[in-house]
Image (tube, rainbow, N blue to C red):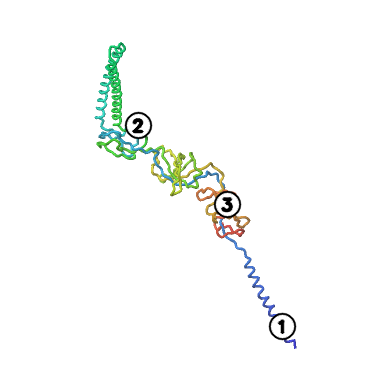
Amino acid sequence: MWKPCSNIYAKTLFLIAMLLIIANPACKKKEVKKTEEKIVNIRVQEAEVKFLKPFLETIGTLSPNEEVIVSTEVDGILREVKVDNGTSVSKGMLLSVIDDTDYSLEVKRAEAVLRQAHATYENTKLEFGRKQSLYKEQLVTQQQFDDVSTRLSLAEADVERAKAALLLAKQKLIKARIYSPISGYVKEKKVAAGDYVKNGANLFVIIQSNPLKLNFTVTEKDVGRLRKGLDVAFRVDAFPGREFKGKVNNIYPSLEEKTRTLQVEALVPNPDNALKPGFFAHVILYTGTERNTVLVPIISLLYEGEAIKVFVVDGGRAKERFVKVGQKYGEMMEIVEGLKAGETVVIAGQQNLSEGVKVNVAR
């Protein structure tokens, strides 16, 4: 009576075994699929070493080394104006002449006053000599001697006053001719011949164009690299194929609060006057001597918060390297720590990488 049950049991075991045999290859296939290793396509470039000077890039503006407003120190009518806008001038060159007729007459009058004062002084001096001798012999009174002494002092003072008046008159006559205080160019002529000008009136603006000043700013984080005498190179749009040079001669004492930058000034030789005040300049400020520098393309860098890393290829696999960066050189970045020259750095596809991933270098 147990036989039918045994047959059923046997059949059940047979069916289970068959199902396991059928299912087992499928499981193996799934396991094979799960263990297939992913390969990431990348592009690479070797880290290179160059002998470079560290530098900062910024922008600046050229301005005159000196800009002087020439004014008149006397009143009068301008008889001549010898320069115009843009005229090249040298130091001491005559710019304009004020009608000096009145000042010439004033000099003559002052000379006459001085002669008269001098004559009075000489006569009084002789009289003082005579009365001094008489006073010693008690032939004149004390009052008479004091009187001539006083008149001699007054005559001497009159001579000094007349000399000062003559000197002042001569100075006014000299100041009727206006000269350039510096060498340069006339930036602006404010008057014309025939104009009446008063003491203190502005006549010309003279600018000194050799050398020029190059004014630029440096960010707060780079201020510690500044010092006088640093070399500066720059280009201007007017001469795209030409490089100009200068040296830092002035570092301002305080930062601009709004921009957190520091103003710096360099002197730039301009012997041929090719450079003009107001030119916009693309500036490179060299902050040290040449040194061996490990460089990688900027596009190879990955940022994780404040940390910076790159991926290198070693044995066909990606290796993660955290690095410390230094100076930027165009499209390249200096690597200070974490990478050696000649190592193969991933420059495309690194966003898809992690430590140890197998890679395929695209050619």
Q: Between marks 3 and 2, how big is the CA–CA gap?
A: 62 Å
Q: What element carries label 2?
A: loop
Relative height, residue 272 to residue 5 (above, below)? above
Check the picture and name the quadrant holding the C terminus.
bottom right
Left of 279 or right of it: where is 191?
Answer: left
Q: How crowded is mark 2: few (under 14 residues within 10 Å), some or many (20 or more)?
A: few
Near-viewer residue (345 or 327): 327
The mark nearer the N terminus, 3 or 2, is 2
Task: Give me the disc on residue 323.
Answer: 3
The residue wearing badge 1 is: 9
Near-viewer residue (198 or 233): 198
Q: What element carries label 1?
A: helix
Residue that appears at 46% across and 40% down: 248
Q: Is mark 3 on a helix, strand or loop?
A: strand
Near-viewer residue (33 or 352): 352
Q: As shown in the figure, which amino acid type bears the numbered disc 1?
A: Tyr
The mark nearer the N terminus, 1 or 2, is 1
Relative height, residue 285 to residue 142 (above, below)? below
Task: Give me the disc on residue 246.
Answer: none
Q: Foreground mark, 3 or 1?
A: 3
Q: As shown in the figure, which amino acid type bears the numbered disc 2?
A: Gly
Left of 105 or right of it: where is 293?
Answer: right
Q: As shown in the figure, which amino acid type bears the numbered disc 3?
A: Val
Q: Where is residue 26 in the image (x, y as percent from the top left)?
A: 64, 73
Farthest residue in the top direction? 137
The mark nearer the N terminus, 3 or 1, is 1
Relative height, residue 258 to residue 154 (above, below)? below
Check the picture and name the quadrant holding the N terminus.
bottom right
Dot 1 and dot 2 residues touching (CB under 8 Å) = no
